[in-house]
Image: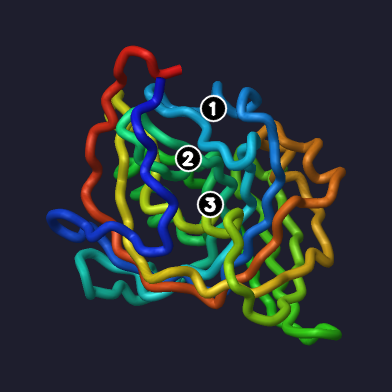
Amino acid sequence: MIPEIDPITQHAPALRGPVLMNQDWRDLTYVHWAVAPERIAPLMPPGVVPDVHDGATYVGLVPFRMANAGPGRRLREPYLGDFLETNLRLYSVDQQGRRGVVFLTLDCERLVVTVAARVAFGVRYRWARMTHDVGVGASGPVHRYRSRVRGSSASATLDLAIEVGPPIEPSALDHFLSARWGLHTSLAGSTRYIPNEHEPWPLHAARLRHLDGTLLEDSGFGDLRARDPDHVAFSPGVHTRFGLPTPAPRTQGMH
């Protein structure tokens, strides 16, 4: 059995201890598909299970612009702190009841950032060619994200476009998918939880206009592209801060 799970709240718990890094996430798009929890359970780190909302968990495709990233609470790194990123993520909870995300892939256009993040956080960062363009649609801006992973995974591509609508009051599902105050990862042979804090996400309605490429297929979720997503939203962004990794030890009864 899992102990009592942290409630989903709009406001992040305050970070304890030093701030590892800070960054802005801008022009962020959420595209999600509901899937059975048992499908993604084998992809969770040890001691972590899929988090569930109304009987389902979700696979999230999340492209955005990283800006002003740097170490500590306020420092910024010129050039290396500004880049495009696309992540494919799952939703997780550990035996301490902490909700988070698990990244299947994180594609990034800065090689140095890609290498450093792999070592520091144990996540599957990949170097990619990426573009982000903003056009005009019938009811609002159209954001288009394109990427192609370099090297041995060069077949992983994405061409995604959404049309942004008006601001919305977040639903229970919006909170479940966006109010995530940490990530679970395998680091140095054990599962770690890396906390973050930021203001509540300002969300807008959004409509998927185009989705092509093989990014989902590359991670074993190619079937999702054949059906409409169950959730699409857009945010102009937030400023976020990350704390130091903490252990997420395995306990008996976690399954």
Q: Is residue 81 left or right of residue 228?
A: left
Q: Which of marks 1 and 2 is nearer the N terminus?
A: 1
Q: Name the residue under label 3.
A: 176
* Dot 1 amino acid type: Leu
> What colour scheme governs how the chains and residues are painted in the rendered image of this protein?
rainbow
Q: Mark 1 points at which residue?
A: 43
Quarter occupied by residue 238? bottom left
Q: Earlier in the sequence, mark 3 or mark 2?
A: 2
The answer to whether marks 3 and 1 mark residues whose Cβ atoms lie closer than 8 Å is no
Kindly report which numbered mark, 3 or 2, lies closer to the viewer in this rendering.
3
- For image coordinates 23% across by 60% down, the residue present is 14
The disc at residue 102 is 2
Q: Where is residue 60 in the image (x, y as percent from the top left)?
A: 62, 49
137 w.r.t. 182: above or below:
below
Q: Where is residue 248 in the image (x, y as percent from the top left)?
A: 28, 31
Q: How far apart are marks 3 and 1 (CA)?
A: 20 Å
The answer to whether marks 1 and 2 mark residues whose Cβ atoms lie closer than 8 Å is yes
Q: Is residue 171 left or right of residue 220?
A: left
Front-most of residues 55 and 101:
55
Looking at the rendered image, the quarter that the N terminus falls into is: top left
Q: Which residue lies furthest to the top in this view?
A: 252
Label 1 secondary element: helix
* Dot 3 amino acid type: Phe
Label 2 secondary element: strand
- For image coordinates 70% across by 61% down, the residue present is 232
**Mark 1 crowd level (few <14, some 14–19, many ≥20, 10 Å Cα):** some
**Mark 2 crowd level (few <14, some 14–19, many ≥20, 10 Å Cα):** many
Label 3 secondary element: helix
